[in-house]
Structure formats: C-alpha cells, structure tokens
Image (cartoon, rainbow, N blue to C red):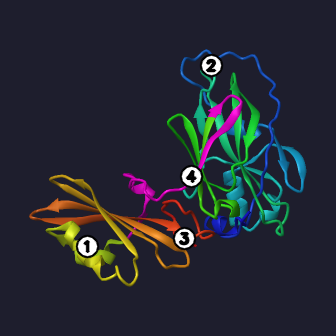
Amino acid sequence: MASFYPYLAGITGTLGGLSLMAYPLSPILPTAVATDLSPQQLSLADLQQTEYTLDVPGRGQIVASPIGWAEFIAAANTSNLETVYGQVVLIDGSEAELDLPIIYRDLDGDQFEEALVTLWVMPQNADDTNGYTALATLLNQGGHPVHVSTEWPGFLYEVTERDDQIIAYVEGRPEDGYQEQVLTYDWTVNGLEKVSQEPISLDGPFPEGRDRYWVSARDRWESVRATADPLGTLQALFAGWAETQIPQQDWVVLTETEDRIVVGLTHRGLQDDSVSAIRYRFEFVAEGPQWRLDWVGQQFSCGWGRGRQSWHHQLCS
C-alpha cells in the first residue's frame, strides 16, 4: 500500500500516512422512540463520542472515540502531530480538499437516519507511514449512535451516494495495475456489502458545477477573449500543440444557446511525469455580435502516486 504522504502533504503541509482496519462492535440497542415525523440525524458530537472497535495492523484491537477533523488540522498546522499520533480521526466533510462527507440515510424506516463515516487511524509515530482508511456504519437507535460494521475499501479519495448505493473511489494497488478503482456498495443496517469493483473511466460527462474545477486565469486565454466562433478559435489555438505535445484531443460543444456557449476539450496520453490527462471547460457569453470568454475551468487525471487518476480539480503533485 502506498504512503499517504503525497496526498496529505497538500492539505497539511506536514502530515504523512495513516492506517486503519476496522471490525464491528456489537450494538446495545436503546429504547427511545422518535416522535418527530422528519428523519433525525446524529450530530457530529454524537459521532465523535461513539466508541469504535478497530483492529489496527501492528497494534491489535483498540476501542476509541475519534478526534474531529478540526482538531487534527490544528495539530498538523502547528507541527504538533505528536499530540495526535495513534488516535482515530473522524472525517466530517468540512475540509474542501476532501470528498469524504458523512452520509446519512434512514435504513430501517424508523425516522432516525443512520450515518456512514470515514475514519483514519493516525500512525503511532513519525516512522509509521503505511495506512488504511475505513467506512464505518453507525445505526441511529432513537438518537443514540451504535457502531455496527466497518468496511476497509483501501485508500479513499471520494465517497458519495448515487442511486441509493454508496460509491467509493480508491487508490489503485499492484493487484489493480495501479489503476484507481470505483467500488459500489449496497448499504443496510448490517453495513456495506460490495456489489462491484471496476477501474475508473475518463469518459464521464463534464460536471456543471464550477466548484468541481480548478479555475484557470483568463489572462492565459487572451487570444480567445472575444470571438465570433468560440469552437473554431479554440481549435486553432490548440492546433499547434497536437502533434508535438498532445497525443489525443477531443472536442465537444456542451451547451449552445442564444446567450451562452460552453466548449469542452479533453487531452489524453500526456507525456508528463505527474499529469496523464487534462480537460478544459470554456464558458462564453454573448456580447453584441461576438462571444466573450467568461470563465475557464480545468480538471486533471494524475499518474499513479501523483494524485487522483479520476477527474478532479486538485493540481497533481
């Protein structure tokens, strides 16, 4: 398993790898009954105060209540990692660089929503760099969290819910040809059950939200700042790069209306130590007889060990 140092260095500037492997804790079921018809969620404080039973490689089984992400970041940013070595960290989705939110769903129809959380175990000391992450299921028993199951998917990049399933993106391992993997799970009161595992694909659609892109400065695109033909002007701009620098270019008009044109461009097979593919989203707005470039966003696919291989908005290391 690769070290976590390259990934976390961009967030904390100081931290290295984490490791975690988790096992279920037998539930103690409280008797409280929901009285509100709207689903009730467990608070972040509830999730942090819960005891998690974890079997950590090289350490054996531990029972711990996790520290919060803010506490972990504070220690990392002040070079006080020794204060949090060996502790469990609960990722709460508050850090913009991480796509690891807490996911809530009422799994048993009792109007109390269960929680799926990402856990990390800090290394015991500065020499301990290997690591694992875990997805822990907590039942909401009348407002009381009960840790019932934990799944070890590998080094997590992203966790999301789609079509009532949990989708996890994890770093590739030697047995996967070092290619990032997409894991699909069914989620029940018994925990996560893996449905499928597939390598990532770069053929997915361009996302609409600007927050999913790294924003490119418009002064880089002075030659296309105003044009009567956005697609043609962009193609002419990149034509000189094709034979020498870009093995494959794919163009697509994503949106075309009377007042807006959006063009997508994907570069694949880049001969670069860190970046294997880049895609651009160019947004133009009508301005008189011409189109004005309003915004440019980029997404990247990194080489193994240099960042995420699926499309994302963080610069590769």
The residue under label 1 is 235
The residue under label 2 is 110
Q: Residue 30 occupies which quadrant of the picture?
A: top right
The answer to whether residue 5 is above or below residue 121 is: below
Between the C-alphas of marks 4 and 1, the distance is 33 Å
Determine the secondary structure under disc 2.
Answer: loop
Mark 1 in CB contact with mark 3 (< 8 angstroms): no
Q: In this view, does 229 lie to the left or right of 254?
A: left
Sequence-first tag of 1 and 3: 1
The question of residue 201 being in magenta is answered with: yes
- What range is drawn magenta here? 187-216
Amino acid type, label 2: Asp
Q: Residues within 10 Å of mark 4 (few under 14, many from 20)?
A: some
Q: Residue 164: give x, y in percent of width and height.
A: 53, 34
Quarter the N terminus occupies: bottom right
Q: Which is in the foreground here, disc 1 or disc 2?
A: 1
Sequence-first tag of 2 and 4: 4
Amino acid type, label 3: Cys
The residue under label 4 is 99
Mark 3 in CB contact with mark 2 (< 8 angstroms): no
The residue under label 3 is 316
